Image: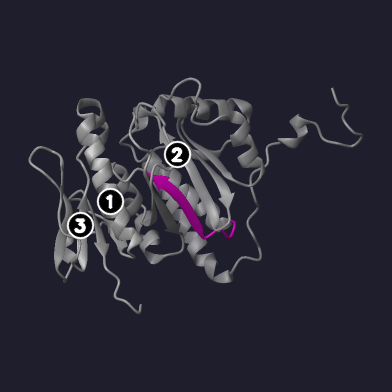
Amino acid sequence: MTPTPAGARTGGDLYRADRGPEPDPGAPRDLDPVRDRAAAAADRAARAAHTEIRELHTLAELTDACDLFQRVWQPAPTNPMMNTDLMRVFAHAGGYVAGSYTGDRLTGACVALLATDGLHSHIAGVDRHARGREVGYALKVHQRAWCLARGITRISWTFDPLVGRNAYFNLAKLGAVPAAYLADFYGPMADALNGDDYSDRLLARWDLAADRVALACAGVPQPAELDDAAREVVAGIEVGPDGRPIVGRTDANVVSVAVPRDIEALRRTDPAAARAWRLAVREVLGGLLADGLVVRGFGRHGAYVLDRVPKGR
């Protein structure tokens, strides 16, 4: 065993209960009103969800968060979703590690690391007993306020483009925008939510000071509906009578790309249909993003809405 050099901190000292980077006094002053409104929005969202959100630092807190992630995703025991070592390092290095509490019970958790363009939110989950209470929304609105207080103006994360409720949450409820389609990003995952499907993901970017995001975090969703489009709309993918995808045209100014009503149930009951959806959405949505179309958002009708950006813009 290597002796500890004189004056060096031991592991217990090194991973002390730091609280992430302090608010940056050198951040642009024009962020001040945005920060103030973001903090107020975070407080309102937590109160509406009847939860308290706080950063996690102790081993007991981090272990509880790991256990929550295991319950949500139910991966193989040999492939945990997260571990206490990584969460402690992320928190100590200035990342975001937070949980939502109802009394003493942890109901949700979110882990994010510092990235080259801001913060990358790696994993967030809500215990099944707390779903439907806007706990996940409160966590993300808190994460936004936490970042703006520290001069961080962008958060990114990935999500499965086939899960319509997550697409609506990320793009309409939060106001994020997809930036890229990532095919089989994580490789095989083999958990209760993903099954044996390819792990395709959309990379979402959340510009925290944008008006669209401020409105969403103030409780005004930003869905993309087809009836607000003044130009021609075509269905790049729609849901067929048998629940499978029907691939259509993609040559109009506005293209809608539908997703299945419940991909997680479809993976259990009809894996072949689930695979057909994965490949169709990869081809159409991924192809449109690669061609430079911009996702306006996700609508209550269960589809992405993409705009063709005129050349020269």
As rendered, which of 55 and 180 lies closer to the eye? 180
- Element carrying mark 2: loop
Residue identified by numbered label 3: 256
Farthest left residue?
A: 241
Between the residue at mark 3 and the residue at mark 2, the CA separation in whole angstroms equals 26 Å
- Where does the C terminus fall, quadrant-wise? bottom left
Q: Is residue 2 magenta?
A: no
Q: Earlier in the sequence, mark 3 or mark 1?
A: 3
Mark nearer the viewer, 1 or 2: 1
- Residue name at image x 32 percent, y 76 percent: 311
Q: Main secondary structure of the magenta part?
A: strand
Given residues 254 and 132, the one toward you in this image is: 254
Q: Residues within 10 Å of mark 2 (few under 14, many from 20)?
A: few
Q: Nearer the viewer, mark 3 or mark 1?
A: 1
Say which quarter of the image contains residue 17. top right
Q: Are marks 3 and 1 in contact (CB under 8 Å)?
A: no
Q: Which residues are magenta?
A: 150-159
Element type where label 1 sits in the image: helix
Vertical comparison of 211 with 166: above or below: below
User: Which dot marks residue 186?
Assistant: 2
Residue 188: x and y, percent?
A: 41, 32
The numbered mark, 1 or 2, whose residue comes first in the sequence reads: 2
Q: Residue at x 50, y 26 (%)?
A: 80
